[in-house]
Image: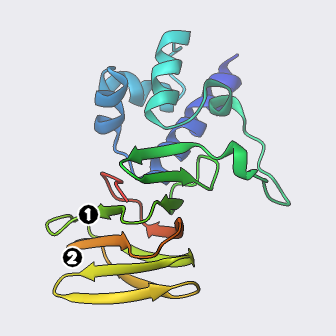
Amino acid sequence: MEEDRKALGLRIRAVRRAHRITVRALAETAELSPAFISQIENGKANASFDALRKISAALGLTFAELFDTTQPTTGRALRRDERPLLLTEEGVRSYSITRPPVGEVDVAVSEYEPGAFSGGHDYTHGNSREVVLILRGRFSFELGDETFLLEQGDSLDFRTNITHMITNVGDEVGEALWVVSPPSSPRQE
């Protein structure tokens, strides 16, 4: 029992740190006290099912993933139709293409209807490195005072603290792959 409690605490701490979340931030999101989170992570407190559900949700895990300590040795497949939907705004759908917890990198793919855009003339988020790769379509990408025309196979890397906006200027649905490291909030591409 004590070994299980310690193992769970170590798992929570590892996931929290991988996501670069402080004890205080986790406690606030999970609506628990920082002292209680610390006691759980140190294996000194038993957490109720309700507290563990709050912690798993705050870490972006399912309840079962909180207890899954197995690490895949050959990779984990995520089928296209199983991708978690991250964001839907007018004409744009963004999906995660990684299973949690990844932690050090945010990877998503976004589909844009003709004329649809994301970001904006005053949009920034954090101070991370972001890379966009155009998978299909034709896009105008405004980055600060510069504008780039990007087509299939083209990529652009930049800091997320620079204003940026991407617009599908093609006649068909376009698709872009986004990689942000470390993840920054709010994720709105």
Return the residue nearer the eye: 177 or 50. Answer: 177
N-term mark: 2 or 1: 1
How packed is label 2: few (under 14 Cα within 10 Å), some, or many (20 or more)?
some
Please give the label number shown on residue 84. Answer: none
- Residue at mark 2: 162
Instruction: From the viewer's side, name the closer residue of 19 and 109.
Output: 109
Q: Residue under label 1, please give it.
A: 126
Horizontal side of residue 144 vs 97, given as left or right: left
- Residue type pointed to by label 1: Gly
Q: In this view, does 13 lie above or below 4?
A: below
Occupied quadrant, residue 10: top right
Q: In which quarter of the image is residue 75?
A: bottom right
Q: What residue do we see at 30% from left, 22% from top?
A: 33
Note whether residue 139 is visible.
Answer: yes
Callout in the foreground (2, 1) = 2
Per the image, label 1 sits on a secondary structure element best described as loop
Q: Where is residue 7 in the image (x, y as percent from the top left)?
A: 65, 32
Amino acid type indicated by mark 2: Ile
Q: In this view, does 81 lie above or below 180?
A: above
From the top left corner, tell me how far across and down residue 189 is, in percent: 37, 60
Q: Which residue lies furthest to the front in this view?
A: 171
State the residue at coordinates (48%, 45%).
86
Question: Spatial distance from mark 2 to mark 1, Cα to Cα?
Answer: 9 Å
Q: At 53% across and 78% down in the image, what residue appears?
A: 134
Quadrant where the N terminus is found in the figure: top right
Q: Can see residue 48?
A: no
Image quadrant where residue 153 sits: bottom right
Q: Viewer-proximal residue, 59 or 137?
A: 137
